[in-house]
Each structure stands twice: as structure tokens, then as C-alpha cells.
Image (cartoon, rainbow, N blue to C red):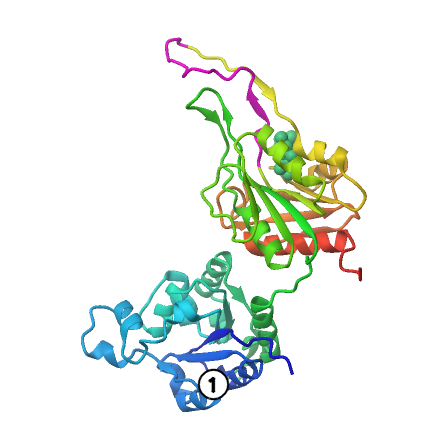
Amino acid sequence: MPVPLSGKTIVLGVTGSIAAFKAPQIVTRLVGQGATVIVVMTENATRFVTPLTFETLSGNEVIVGMFPDTKKGVASLEEAASGTERLKHVHLAEAADLVIIAPATANTIGKMANGVADDFLSTELVAMTCPVIVAPAMNVRMMESDAVRDNMETLKARGVIFVEAEVGRLASGAVGKGRLADLENIIGVALDALLPKQDLAGRRVLVSAGPTREPLDPVRFIGNRSSGKMGYALAERALRRGADVVLVSGPSLLDPPDGVEYVSVETTAEMLHAVMRSFAEADLLIMAAAPADYRSARPSQAKIKKTAEKLTLELVRTEDILSQAGSARREGQGIIGFALETSAEVEEGRRKLIAKDLDIIVVNNPLVEGAGFDTDTNVAVILTRSGRENELAKMSKRDLADVILTEAITELGWGERR
Ligand code: CTP
């Protein structure tokens, strides 16, 4: 029998909800798939299930609440977390491939959202860089409170993956949303996070990202506020889903994902050349960049001095990269464009989709809260050539990248057997 999770280390955080009694089954399922599971319990969780249960099922020592060394006077909890005798060989934040918090109480979710580190689990969570899955379980009133909802929104925007609680009879006897998600559902999300489906394997995806800069003189330029976050998220997700990825990027503070072919450019003309050089080989072009639409008609070779009272710049249109790619496209190539619209988004988007002969256009309104430049989230509508219209709620750019790629696979018919 293949063991899909062999070599993977999963930290299971168990917090103080009655649903903690279901967590041992998660351990059993994950261990059965070959994973190494380290269980971290809050003190309150031990009132519902004993650490011995988890220790027996996982075959590993269970970490509970605080730990002995805090009583011996270590300088800080952080120091204790990385330096206890008991844990000297386990630097969980480095070892973990995935963290699952199941069940997650309102308290733990609140601490995560606010960076509170007052016990072992919350301290480790602040340091974690691997994917984190949260499966909440709580009373329906708590679940619907503004505080919990805001905290969950914050975490989702940071890329934390939620397995939503289900509607059902709760421990209090009330019926409502708050019951821990079905265990198979939690395991499925975990498998997906660790072993993303390779539905872009064998495809070559060309992504443009970031702003461009059009020089006015050797020290000044015309630029825009694009951060590159959307394009970099698309490149990262396409890579994870098995594609060969070329990322053509204007100036951005972000690090290109390991494994992409990275081309750094400055001006719209440079971006055009870089995109067209890779386009013939690409199966899909995603123009997430915000190339400048105008450049100086005559950039000055020398620094412009402030001698005159008035300075008039003459600007001329830059090349439209999408149009040029559109004219060069061959059978079977997909093209995705973006549009920023501040009114009549869907109508304008559909007009541009047709005018530019695109397969998909992703429209967003930068005036909407949670959308636009330099945010970690976006609020978008995806329009496709075949007429689908997918109006999305606010989500992380990483999640939006996945939705866009899935839409592309559907629109281009790549899901069918090749
Ligand atoms: N784009 C391009 N070449 C340019 C400028 C933009 O390929 N020189 C691409 C962007 O990457 C994006 C899309 O075109 O995918 C944006 O289209 P555009 O019509 O420029 O959108 P807006 O900027 O919203 O247009 P307008 O200002 O005309 O509404």
C-alpha cells in the first residue's frame, strides 16, 4: 500500500472544546497515511482527552500547555519553546510541513489573529511558516460573534485554510453552525495542502507581474502602485500545481518563488520583449502586471534641473502587451487579462474580454475594501469567454490565484483526458 504522507511531519493542535474527543481519530488517519504526527494540546484540551491517548496513537510525546522549564525561570516563553530539555530535538516550526488546529476554539483563533503567544501552541503558531489549517468548533453564538468573524477573516486573508464548522446539534443542545467539520473533510483538506493536485503538469504558464517604470531622466520615473502580489501568487500556485512557470516581473520587493524561471524587467517595452520571447512556448499567458500605459516621449539623458517654473512632460502610449500576444497567439493557447474598474465592472470587463479576445478576464475594483494594490486580499469577478461569471468574495490573493487557475483549466478544456 502506498503511504502518501510518508516523510511529512504534521503538528496537530488540540484545543479545549468538547469536540477534542474526535481529534484522536484525526491522528489515527494521518498516521495511517504515513505521516509523523506531533500533538500539541492546550491545558484546557486535557480536560476532554488525556495526552496518553494521543501519545499512544501517534507514537510521539505529546506537548501540553506550558512546559516544565517555564517554572525554572527561563527568560521568555519563546526561549522555552526552542530550548527546553524536553524539546531540544524538536524545533516544531522548522520540522512541520503542516499544522492542523482541530478543534480550534474561539480563544485560539483570537490568539492566532492577534499574534498572542502565551502557551506552547500559540507560541509555535506565531513562528510557523508552513500551511496552517484551522477547523473551528464552538457554540453558535460565539461562531457568529463579530469578534470571531473578524478574527477568521484576518486569518483567511493571511492564507490560513479554514475547514468550516458544520450545522448540527451542538454540545449545548442548540442547533446551529459550530460543530467540528467532518473528519474526512479535514483529512481531505490536509492531503490537498500537502499534496496539491498536479492538474497543470506538462503545461507552461507565463505570468507577468508588478509595475513597470518609465524613465523621465536617469533618476526619475513614472510608475504605479502595483506590488506584484497577485502575479507572484499566480506563479507560485501554478508551480505547485505542476506547471513550468516563467515569471516576467517589473520592480517588486517580493522574492520570486523557488523553481520559476524569473525574468526581471523595468519598462513596458522590456516587459513586451520578455513576454513575447516566452509566449510561443507557453500554453497560458496571465497578464497580472500593471505595465505603464504611457512613457516619456523624450526621456532626458541628463538629470532634469528645476530651473523652469513649469515643466511639461510629453507622454506617448506604450505598447499593449495583451494585444500583441493576442495577434501572435496560436491554436490552443490561453490568455488571461486583468482589468481595474471603478464602476460598471462586469459590463466593462465583458467589453474588454471581447475587445482583447481573451479567454478570461479578472476584474477588480480598487475602491472596494480588501481589493487593489498592495493588499494581501482581493475581491474579483472572473468572466470567461464561454459566458461564465464568477463573483467572488474577499479572499487571499493566494486563494484567488487558485480559483483563476481552476477557471482556466475549465475554460481551456484542460481538465479532460489528454
Ligand atoms: N496591459 C498590457 N499592456 C499594457 C498595459 C496593460 O498588456 N501596456 C494588460 C495588463 O497586464 C492587464 C490589462 O492589460 O492584464 C489591463 O488592461 P487595460 O485595458 O490597460 O486595463 P485598464 O488599465 O483597466 O484600462 P483602461 O485604463 O483603458 O480602463
At x 63%, y 79%, the residue is: 2
Is residue 116 visible in the rendered structure shown here?
A: yes
Q: Is residue 81 left or right of residue 150?
A: left
Q: Is residue 150 left or right of residue 394?
A: left
Q: Quadrant of the N terminus?
A: bottom right
Front-most of residues 11 and 218: 218
Going by the numbered disc 1, the residue's amino acid type is Ser
Front-most of residues 259 and 64: 259
Expressed as whole percent of the image width and height from the top left, the position of residue 33 reads: 58, 80
Residue matched to label 1: 58
Rendered view: 51 above or below 220: below
Front-most of residues 208 and 176: 208
Q: Which residues are magenta?
A: 290-309
* Magenta-drawn stretch contains 26: no
Quarter location, residue 38: bottom left
Count up the numbered dots: 1
Rendered view: 348 above or below 236: above
Assign ligand 1 to one image quadrant.
top right
Is residue 343 visible in the rendered structure shown here?
A: no
Expressed as whole percent of the image width and height from the top left, the position of residue 217 reads: 45, 19
Q: Is residue 116 left or right of residue 202?
A: left
Front-most of residues 408 and 309: 408
Q: Residue furthest left?
A: 73
